Amino acid sequence: ASHPALDWVYVGGEFDTATNADGSTVSVRNLARYNLRTGRWASVQGGTSGPVYALEAVPFKHLVLDNLSGGLDAHTIYVGGRFAQVFDGAGTPTDVQNVAWRGADGQWRGFAGGTAGPVYALEVMAGREFTGRGFERCGEITAPDVYVGGAFTSVTSNGPQVPASNIALATVYPGGTQWTVLGRPFGQGAAGTPGTGVNGTVRSLRTIGPQS
């Protein structure tokens, strides 16, 4: 995933070291970024506890934070894979479930209860505008819509798991994430009910339309 305005290339996978052209190394954990201007590798805080299979990096216009006052010149990244924790720069873990995002404030956040299985594909859209309260710089904030694909049987918002067959939609609001199962509103369908979606692993996603 790249962010052309900031000249960063983000790299995810299963690794613990990045090597610069001069032979110096940087300790990383499944997630790293490369600066196209300086030609140097850097860590993305403490990385993830397991492999990263999907990455998206988007500019601040997609950003949703609890407080936007200091983050309008930055960007946010969305990460999917097979991991249960993400780490800040001091190594402090945040519990997540296979998918997470990091905003301009440098804090990692999960997608509510996450997915019941690994995530292999992410696609971020501009999402929905709503009037935010308590934001210092803008009233209309965009809540990103993030399509999530992988090999999972359910997703969890702020309640019980709801069946979802390998694909679902997450809307990232300030302070939380709302999952939508494709084909029906979230919350319909009890545990054990087949989820809508596809009957095999999703490994790529792409949206087409005015928001993509």
Image (tube, helix red, strand yellow):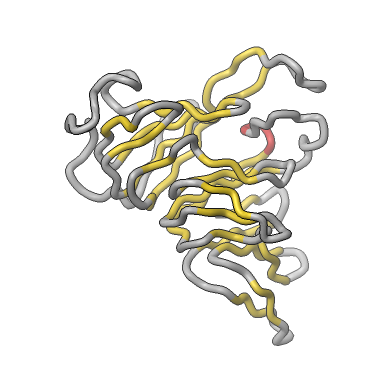
Q: Is residue 194 left or right of residue 51?
A: left
Q: Position of residue 39 (x, y in %)?
A: 72, 71
Residue depicted at x 41% and y 56%: 82
Q: Is residue 30 left or right of residue 74?
A: left
Q: Is residue 187 above or below residue 205?
A: above
Locate the N terminus and report the quarter of the image it occupies: bottom right
Q: Is residue 185 above or below residue 104?
A: above
Res. 169 image quadrant: top left
Q: Position of residue 212 (x, y in %)?
A: 48, 33
Residue depicted at x 65% and y 12%: 131
Q: Is residue 150 left or right of residue 12?
A: left
Residue depicted at x 62% and y 59%: 9
Of all residues, the one furthest to the bottom in this rendering is 23
Q: Position of residue 48 (x, y in %)?
A: 55, 59
Res. 59 image quadrant: top right
Res. 133 image quadrant: top right
Please give the count of numbered marks on the rendered protein: 0
Q: Between residues 212 and 11, which one lies in front from this camera angle?
A: 11
Residue depicted at x 64% and y 50%: 3
Q: Position of residue 142 (x, y in %)?
A: 61, 24
